[in-house]
Amino acid sequence: MGVRTRMTLASVAATLLTATALLPLIDRGSWYPRAFLAVLLTAGVGAAARRLSMPRPTVVAVQLVASLALLSFYFARQQAVAWLLPGPDAVRRLADLAGQGVRDVGEYTTPAPLTDGIALLLIGGVLVIALLVDALAVTYGLAAPTGLPLLALYSVAAGLSDEGTHWFTFCAAAAGYLALLLADGRERLTRWGRAFGGAGSVSPARSGQRTGRRIGAVALGVALLAPVALPSLGGSLMAGAGSGDGPGGSGPVDSVDLLVELRDNLNETDDRTALTVRTTSRRTDDLYLRIVSLDEFDGKTWEASPRRTVDLPDRFPTPPGLGLQVDRREVTSRISAAGWYRQRHLPMPYPATWADAVGDWRLDPVGMTVIGGRKDTTADKSWQVASLEVLPTREQLAAAPAPGPELRNLTELPASLPEEVGERAREVTKGSRNAYEQAVALQEWFSRTGNFSYDTQVEVGEDSRAITRFLRDRKGFCIHFSFAMASMARSLGIPARVAVGFAPGSEQGDGSVEVTLRDAHAWPELYFEGVGWTRFEPTPTRGTQPEYTRPETAPGASARPSEAAVEDTASAEPSARPSASVSCTVELKRLDACPEPTDPALVADGGGGPRWPGTLLWTAAGLAALLLPLTPMLWRLRVRALRLGAHGRGEADVLPHTLRVWRELTDSAWDLGLPPDDSLTPRRAAERIVRGGRLDPATAEAVHRVASAVEQVLYAPRARAAPGLAADVRGVCAVLRGSVGRGTRLRALLAPRSAARVRWALASWMAGVRSRLSRRAA
């Protein structure tokens, strides 16, 4: 393997290993194979350009063109020429996607969804780093400075990650850089020739390699151990990702860790007070404090989908689905957190209308949750929240129309979910006339008629049959009940999600409400058009069931909420301008927070970008389509470099070198409009070039020197080398190019006339093949 090849592979490995630090930032890693392929192809283009002896700036330019073509193929195929060549429309498309990606990065929390804009930033950023590393280390032979772009790539990943990057990604990036330095060291040692030692001696090259390995190992060890030995340094770039926080954790909310910690809190022997609430509501038994809503179900667990966040507004948008006809009352609550309780989301009643908290807090307008910055938690803080007590009637819930197509993703269930779940849901709700009656039937079955028991010792379960085991054993705690009811509701076509937070706490003598660890809770929320997300309580002995979800016990029973609720509603002032709702309100549209409908074609295809075989074939075809028109130019540059390059110093090398230089002179003149005439002697051909090119005396003398050298090696008894022939030809060609117009120069570069020699050589070879075949046949 050549030195340049080793350096190229080392630069590719260093870039791709460092790029692994970006993987935790995105919820899907399907961008990485595309980046992997793009880096390999760009490095291959650079290697090919260097093999053609192109000037170093030209090598970098060719790689840039190839990278832009790849990005056009990935993200702007419809706008690009022949799906690959980046025209003006493709450039505009890439610019728009890049701008969208920048906005997405600022609005989503990590791990963010893989939007087209974010994918372009990731793949494009990795390509830029790969080009810098390849140019510095291979093209210009400067391996040490490549640590700067690699460090920049790693620092971006560490800066955007809430918990820093994993130790493995740091080790991978360091290993890639050390491999690049090692390859560069071997290349530098080979310049001194091969070193030999006597018996028992060690060659300088091998000694240098060993020393380099030892230095690298010591440096890597120091980097790994320094943060441990020096606690005062705080977090480092290689800080491992910590676990997410549950109702008592510390870190970004991760649904799996949150649910596990919820179970641990319920089993906690030391029931500590986490929150203290003072509220104007007279319905403290319904004061649920929600942390986050989980709306994605993969068959094993529920997770929160990545969403955009906006700066905390003065007034929150109207809750999705809530219409004017539904009674509501606005109440205010002041919530204080204990010093040990660290949470990145503000526990709040749903739906909130505004919130006031000290720190960098942002609003998720779809989930109606408030999320803190990287350093903001609830520990030892207080915040004030205004929220709505929504009081729909049974008639309003029963008359709710079917949800729109924009909520289709909230009724989907994975194929891995056993059919038994849907069959049991239909069995339990048999005879129900609408979605509301189905939801009430499910709640009644779980909380009363189904003989379920509450048990916090049951494992959460992380496989697709966890729900069926719960339905069979009929034993579990709030996670099991909420997961099962939400899944069964979705099987009936009712949009459903799971909320995690705290059930109502205990009212104290001073009017405050204390919320403890054992109040940690999960409950299902079902969507009804015109009412919005509605809380249900299927878990027996936990929380309270809203009045509107309880079945009527006798004919003629009031369809209104309880008398106390009516009294509260009647005495309250109307809330501030709630808008009539469909699934996306005007405020959400203004915030660009409406959920986008899922394209059926994308759902069927699975998304995630081009498939590997197709990507490889199309990329190869695109590169071929890009390079095919440039083939004459690349061939001509290669031939010129060989003809005017270094040559042997022996007598046998003088003749071929002189003839190659002469051929380069005549072909360059041919490219610029002066076709050769093989019937002329070198002297007459030189005069023809001087006249046709209108050359000045100094340049004409250089042409005649080359012609004289050709005559000498052809006719003299002994060929003698003439110095400076290649320099003479380069000077003559430069003057010839300056004497013609721009169009002629461009034609000579892109479509040189002398490329016809390839056709002639091919025709001659084919004629020879036919002649040999004819002789063999005879």
Image: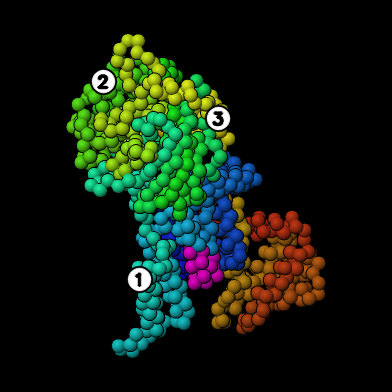
Decide if residue 673 is on the left or right side of residue 577. Answer: right
Q: Earlier in the sequence, mark 3 or mark 1?
A: 1
- Residue tagged 3: 576
Distance from disc 1 to disc 2, alpha carbons, whole Å, reads 62 Å
Would residue 711 be counted in the magenta stretch? no
Disc 2 on helix, strand or loop? Answer: helix
- Residue tagged 2: 427
Crowd class of label 3 (few under 14; some 14 to 19; many from 20; radius 10 Å): few
Distance from disc 3 to disc 1, alpha carbons, whole Å, reads 57 Å
The furthest residue to the top: 555
* Tag 2–tag 3 contact (CB < 8 Å): no
x, y percentage for residue 394?
39, 18
Tag of residue 553: none
Overall secondary structure of the magenta section: helix
Magenta-drawn segment: 135-151
Question: Nearer the viewer's eye, disc 1 or disc 2?
Answer: 1
Residue 350 found in image quarter: top left
Would residue 149 be counted in the magenta stretch? yes
